[in-house]
Amino acid sequence: MSTKYNLCILALILLYHYPVWAQRNDSSGFSITPRYSFYTSEKKGEYLLHVPPAYQSKELDIKIETGDSLVTIFSGKPAGKLLRIPFEINLSPAIYKVRASITASASGNARFTCGTSLIILRHKANEVKTDRLTGGLVVNNLPFYPFGFYCYSPVEESLPEDEVVRGFNMMSPYQKIMPETFAERKAYMDRCATLGIKVNYNLLSVSGGGGVGSRIQGLSEEERKSRLITEIKTFRDHPALLGWYIADEPNGNRVSPEMLEEIYRIVKENDPWHPITAVFMAPFITSKKYIEGFDIAMADPYPLPDLPVSLPGEVAGQLRDEFYGKRPVWIVPQAFGGGELWSREPTWQELRSMTWLSIIKGATGIEFFVRQGPNYFPKSQATWGECGKMAMEVAELTPWILSDDAAPAAVCPSQNIEVTTRMHNGELVILAVNKVNEPVNTTIR
């Protein structure tokens, strides 16, 4: 057997809406946000203060207040662009306005202010928080790395059973929200809950955010909104629910940032306990214009066969830099081919490279497009089997991938090797990927 490509992991070693106001001077100013999208039963929390470059090595005096009450203070040097400020939580469920006052004593007592909202909700058994520091999710009070796939409707009867044993923990069926297919939706949601699979629930047909086969003809705006709210209320307490998927490539489907923000507001008003996702197409960085309309930024770079296999990793890195400390980033790896612009699907080596490059560069969720069994997409059982192997690897390494512990940097002299490190409970993991289709002899220091 011969393959044209030979790409693999070189080493795998052991908003709710947050308005910001009172921000001073230029675009490189200070900003602040809570670490979690909301808090419920936690007794301690953290604020993340984004520090402009000019003040990252300066002595700062910071006072954080809610109304007339002092929350916490900090004095010292940030030593980086993101300063973690712990605080005690002793508030009742509500939305609180938070104000940070910053004084830079070494710069003539320059003073700055910035603000955010702190959301305290009552605890719900199926709540899902986003962790803006690590980019992960918090499910059942534990770090959660979503690793799953898109699929089509009606959902194949045995699909959840077939895929949960491979290690997948999330799925997202394309679907139309219609009364006559409600039983189908409830059936797969109930089965996923039984098996322990979470669902990134597709609302595209009533949220107006685009999507494959999601248009419902003849639906008035009033009826669309009514169906959207009814669907949210129906499944918001379901144990299988992970989040709400409201937009598919809005930057390519004439959905404006203002339109997405309105959809976001409606969903959050009816369910503030679950994150909202939207996927973006090239140019992927345009997603920053939509930041007030999603909790998780997704991107779908499909490079093969004409573009480099390193593209998904590059996109993940670009979005991670843009949304660091603000929004998690998920990548949608290409798991299809043989039609339209994509004359073939990836090999298993290419899929492994794309997926792990994305993770190394900052993706904290993977959702393959697309799974249609038994071997329609991907057509190669070996390729989909490799996706299952990676699901198992990510599950084992989740404590490291989503760790907030500082790790020593890894250095590799080869530009063809992408490498990173993660530390968890004093144990170091090194992740490295070969970006080119040839063996590389190198060292990692």
Image (tube, grey):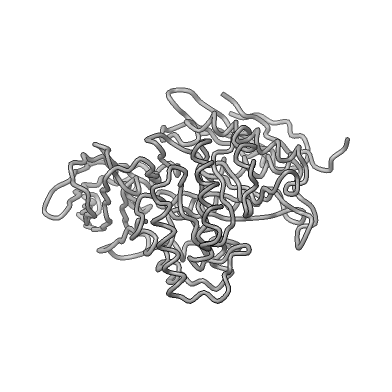
Q: Residue at x 56, y 23 (%)?
A: 14
Judged from this view, the residue extending furthest toward the left is 68
For the residue pair 315 and 331, the one nearer the viewer reads as 331
Reply above or below: 7 against 17.
above
For the residue pair 407 and 324, the one nearer the viewer reads as 324
Reply above or below: 325 against 141.
below
Q: Residue at x 63, y 44 (%)?
A: 157
Q: Does residue 227 show up?
A: yes
Q: Position of residue 280 (x, y in %)?
A: 56, 60
Q: Does residue 408 show up?
A: no
Q: Residue at x 62, y 29 (%)?
A: 12
Reply above or below: 401 against 32.
above
Q: Position of residue 104 (x, y in %)?
A: 24, 51
For the residue pair 196 and 403, the one nearer the viewer reads as 196
Residue 109 location, quadrant: bottom left
Q: Is residue 56 left or right of residue 211?
A: left
Q: Is residue 38 left or right of residue 303?
A: left
Q: Position of residue 227 (x, y in %)?
A: 45, 65
* Quadrant (top left/top right/bottom left/bottom right) for the C terminus: top right
